[in-house]
Amino acid sequence: MPKVVVIGGGGHAKVAISVLKKSGFDIVGYTDHENRGGVLGVPYLGTDDILPALRNDSSDCGIVIGVGKVNASPSRSELFAKISALGFHFPVLVSPGASINEDIQLSAGTVVFDGVVVNSGSKAGRMCILNTNSTVDHDCLVGDNVHIAPGATLSGGVTVGDNTMIGTGAVVIHSVTICAGCLVGAGSTVVKDLTTPGIYVGSPARRIK
Ligand code: JB3
């Protein structure tokens, strides 16, 4: 069984832990700024300060970043860079309950939760969260550290830039490009390119900040 440590012990980590268990990983424990006790039976190991020693003792151990995000911040990518520099690898985690079709590329640290559909010809970069029941339809190009929230839909040929978040249940119509650093609010509908970083809400989605 491949060994992993989960970073963070909050809500996102819980979902990742359940998917890791279903996917046959051996979860050594989790790190957090604070001891949250056992999380779904996974023990607390300490803060991220334990990672260098862990890397020395267990060079085959992978990392799953269980710290999520609900904004367009690059902080998860910064965490990825910091932990990568210690020499850890970041497995791609795909729930057995997701449907991944042909000619798909998913990069290091990306997690794909239950009920997700990724259709043929799509690519997602590093550290993406394809959250529960979201859809990435054919030929989409998703950057690094993008969160597609539960139930959100990217139609065919959509491009999403780094660090962007597509909110719960939002819809992006076919062939639209959304630049890096956008937050698309829950339930919004994006019908044209978003070319300026910011917060977009409504149907059709308009920039509010
Ligand atoms: O929208 C959905 C379905 N999920 C959200 C997810 C994507 O993002 C969820 O609702 C949350 O809003 C958010 O989940 P997350 O990040 O798990 O949030 P929270 O429950 O607040 O837990 C974050 C945990 O990570 C806290 O216990 C923090 O102390 C810990 N943490 C933050 N930064 C860290 C670090 N832990 C470590 N080891 N290292 C860090 O740098």
Image (cartoon, rainbow, N blue to C red):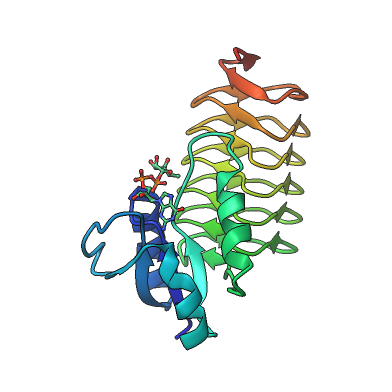
Q: Height in image: 16 above or below 61?
A: above
Viewer-side residue, 160 vs 203 = 160
Task: Judge whether residue 128 can be spotted in this image.
Answer: no
Figure quadrant of the C terminus: top right
Which residue is at a point 47% across and 47% down the rendered structure image?
133
Which residue is at a point 36% across and 66% down the rendered structure image?
30
Task: Specify whether 49 is left or right of 11.
Answer: right
Residue 5 screen position, x and y as percent: 43, 71
Residue 10 screen position, x and y as percent: 33, 51
Rendering quarter of residue 104: bottom right
Task: Specify whether 110 is left or right of 124.
Answer: left
Which residue is at a point 26% across and 62% down the rendered structure image?
39
Figure quadrant of the N terminus: bottom left
Rendering quarter of residue 19: bottom left
Residue 125 screen position, x and y as percent: 69, 54
* Residue farthest toward the left in the current orientation of the protein: 37
Q: Height in image: 208 above or below 115?
A: above
Viewer-side residue, 70 vs 93 = 70
Residue 58 screen position, x and y as percent: 48, 86
Task: Specify whether 175 is left or right of 76.
Answer: right
Q: Height in image: 207 above or below 21?
A: above
Q: Height in image: 18 above or below 189?
A: below
Viewer-side residue, 10 vs 20 = 10
Which residue is at a point 46% across and 47% down the rendered structure image?
68
Figure label count:
0
Task: Judge whether residue 121 can be spotted in this image.
Answer: yes
